[in-house]
Amino acid sequence: MSSLELDTPVQYVKGVGPHRSEQFAKSGVRTVEDLLLYFPRRFNLRRQVQPIGTLRGDEPAATVAGVIRETNYKAFGRKPYFECGLDDGSGWVVAKWFHGGYLTDRIKPDMHIAVSGKVSVYRETLQFINPRWEVIWDPAGTNLNADELLPVYPSCGPMPSGLISNIIKGILPETQRLFARWFDDEHLHRRDLPARPDAIAAMHRPEDHAAWTLAKHRLAYDEFILMQLGIAIQRMRAVSRPAYSLKVSGEIDRRIRARFPFSLTASQDRVVAEIVSDLGRSRPMNRLLQGDVGSGKTVVAIYAALVGVAHRKQAAIMAPTEILARQHYAKVEQYLSGSRVRIALLVGAQKKSEKDDILERLADGKIDIVVGTHALLSKKVRFRSLGVTIVDEQHKFGVRQRGGFRAKGYAPHCLVMTATPIPRTLALTVFGDLDVSVIDEMPPGRGETQTRCVDKSRMNEVFDFVRERLADGQQAYFVYPLVADAGNAKLSAAQTAHDELTDEVFADYTVGLIHGQMPTAEQQSAMSRFAAGEIRVLVASTVVEVGLDVPNANVMVVVNAERFGLAQLHQLRGRIGRGKDNAACILVADSKNPIAAERLRVLAETNDGFKIAEADLRLRGPGEFFGTRQHGMPELKIADLIEDYDLLQIARRDAFAIVQTDPDISAPEHQTLRAELLKAYGGRVGLVAEG
């Protein structure tokens, strides 16, 4: 046994071999370390075993163990059953399972098993009916004379949990030798954590539930601290580079504010102050700006860009879609009309000659602010003096892209924005390398948005309501989960719905269509006509989630709303209520799905984006929150971002303290942590490798 190491292939563990190692590999278990970190999903309590000879036949619950002497399967009749006879030397008992044909290949003569359940007597024979059972794989090494928590493992192909348990039990004593201790006793004592080898052993064979909870707590801390070390290293590398100090004088502030035909809200003022403080330092700003749709993030972004321009530096604003890039460009153009600030738009659909001209002027410093899409990440794009970068809807870009955008200049200040409220747990993970600012109030003079949930059977009532609003001169969105019919009768598609609404439901009005698969020019045309009021009803896919700002559109109908995430629905809802009139959002869903009904109820009860985001995270999990895993979100096997939030904060403080004194995790006392960090995230861009 002592020849085993953590990297030893699992096939050399006693009881495994080549065939079972293939089955283990399908569940990601390839080494001894993988096997010891393959934890049970739950535990069953096996009561102390009593001799069969002591059974009376009226016990409400009992546990016995013995050798199977015979089996019998009756496949026909009103109640087919499988039974076996069990002998422990003190007596005989029958265990019977009705409809138990599946057990014929699992319970065989000469096997040792334990059964638990109610005891009765039938024709003078003691019997268990449909008892719980388990194989005793090692009768000589199993203590049946005490209650025991039995681990239940996720299955590996045909290997039952009991067999996996027995294999792991055989090497569990090696845990202390094989696993290094990451921290000294003082560190663990202050945080009330057990040593890592003790925790790993207790995850498999805890003395009681409290011991298992403590072990799980320790391993969750380990996952968090590796994640936060990666984030801390990334942040340290980003802020360690020198940046232009862009201080804001009273005159600069006055001149920038004069470009806006309104006063900033108190919330915008607070965020601007935070950004101004960052820009004045000689290290790069790395700040996340959160705010609901319509809260005024773009104004704050333009303020930051103009600070750079005031210091004769260039600024770049990147958006995830051409539609949104054009909208940002229109806003910049509107606010800077008549100024000497030179602006340009760079998107994929432009002619080569136009692009080449913009690229040349950017490199020569003859463009002050450029707005664009992914095209800004091209190697051909060079800046003369890039001072400020702004990335909108950050979660739609990968970490590599964000880093590449920063690298375009000499340590530019970076502001990333999102209209998706980020739960506090994800703010410490996905965006853990950034400072966070929040715009938590809307500009004055906005109408209220009421949200209602209705069943699909009431669609005609919805149509009647929309007609009333259209008759009052308003406009409406109809949003669908699919662009085209995919053969699913339960889901509606935008193209099919457009035909129906045009020909039958709203024949008296102009009905438009927009979705992500249309050419950009057609999308732009539909948007322009809708904004001008020429199109009264716009049928859309989720392309309207970002980018459309039509104050007269105050009705939104989302069909098959149960197919959308809460955060996404909240984003969609933000497209209405942008004028002075009240707005109505109608979520049409299948009310027979209780989980979907609960999710939509949350949306109907609150307009608070952060409450909705927390609920969405709780209901759907972190992997689905943004609809993509490209942002570098680490996978957590033990830790829970919601339940273990306090532990996440502790691990974050510890990780940042370590990196503060040991930026490369190279000190002798940190060598184990460094090895584990590289093993876990060495190839994960944005956590360790990015700088």
Image: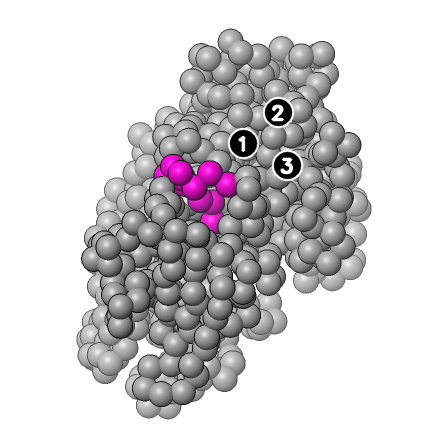
- Which one is nearer the viewer's eye here, 398 or 228? 228
Question: Residues at badges 2 and 1 in contact (C-beta under 8 Å)?
Answer: yes
Q: Callout 1, which amino acid? A: Ala
Numbered tag placed on residue 171 in the rendering: 3
> Is residue 601 shown left or right of residue 664?
left
Numbered tag placed on residue 595 in the rendering: none
Magenta-drawn segment: 142-152
- Which one is nearer the viewer's eye here, 69 or 207? 69
Which residue is denoted by mark 1 in the rendering?
Answer: 201
> Is residue 528 shown left or right of residue 24?
left
The quarter of the picture where the N terminus appears is top right
> Is residue 566 shown left or right of residue 168?
left
Which residue is denoted by mark 2 in the rendering?
Answer: 176
Tell me if residue 298 is in the magenta stretch: no
Res 196 quadrant in image: top right
Identity of the residue furthest to the bottom in this view: 503
Q: Residue 175: horizontal and vertical position, in percent?
A: 62, 29
